[in-house]
């Protein structure tokens, strides 16, 4: 899987459907205890425009004081591959119980915070049904599921 990151500059999201992988297990990671979930509905969200959504999300995180005033802890991350077929789970646009969607690409915000030597990396994905924000490792395990599909056109 390919990741491209950029600070506070984003680019459209289209959904491709039809692949129904084997069901995944429910998320097993709790939200970070000192970072209770925030209501994702309080942020601007337009379906299928993830890059614009992330841009506006980053601006609002800065405005609300939830991020570094200069946005230095926020990254817009574009997820894609050569086939433009990105399987993700726990997506609100899904029509399946496991939240599976096959996107051509997807954009999320990763916040990388450091505090007295502690590292807390969070994923802000307005299209996900996982906790908002979601601990980075939980998001990778549950939404990206790097071992799913093995060595195929969907492999990451």
Image: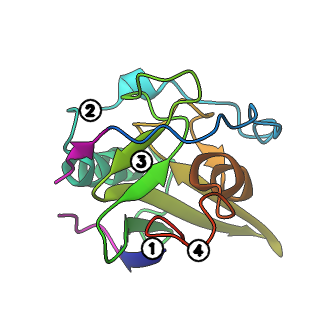
Q: Which residue is mark 1?
A: 72
Q: CA distance from mark 1 to mark 3?
A: 12 Å
Q: Which residue is mark 2?
A: 45
Q: Residues within 10 Å of mark 1 (few under 14, many from 20)?
A: some
Asked if the residues shown at circle 4 and circle 3 are in contact, with their CB atoms under 8 angstroms apart, the answer is: no
Residue 98: mark in rendering: none
- What residue is rendered at 56% in x and 29% in y? 38
- The quarter in which the C terminus is drawn is bottom right
Q: Residues within 10 Å of mark 2 (few under 14, many from 20)?
A: some
Q: Which residue is mark 4?
A: 151
Report the magenta residues as a range: 6-17
Assign the magenta stretch its main secondary structure: loop
Q: Residues within 10 Å of mark 3 (few under 14, many from 20)?
A: some
Q: CA distance from mark 2 to mark 1?
A: 23 Å
Circle 1: element type? loop
Instruction: State which tag comes first along the sequence, 4 or 1.
Output: 1
Q: Depth check: give the residue in front, 40 or 82.
A: 82
Q: Which residue is mark 3?
A: 61
- State which mark lies toward you, 4 or 3: 4
Rendering quarter of residue 127: top left
């Amino acid at each position: 899987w390919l990741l491209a990151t950029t600070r506070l500059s984003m680019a459209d999201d289209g959904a491709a459907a039809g692949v129904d992988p084997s069901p995944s297990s429910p998320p097993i990671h709790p939200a970070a205890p000192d970072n209770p979930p925030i209501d994702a509905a309080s942020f601007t969200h337009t379906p299928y425009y993830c890059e614009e959504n992330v841009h506006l999300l980053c601006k609002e995180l800065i405005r609300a004081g939830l991020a570094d005033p200069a946005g230095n802890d926020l990254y817009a991350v574009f997820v894609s591959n050569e086939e433009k077929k990105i399987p993700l789970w726990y997506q609100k646009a899904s029509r399946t119980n496991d939240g599976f969607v096959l996107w051509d690409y997807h954009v999320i915000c990763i916040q990388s915070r450091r505090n007295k030597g502690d590292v807390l990396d969070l994923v802000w994905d307005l299209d996900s049904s996982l906790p908002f924000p979601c601990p980075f490792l939980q998001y990778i395990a549950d939404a990206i599921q790097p071992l799913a599909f093995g060595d195929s056109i969907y492999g990451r």
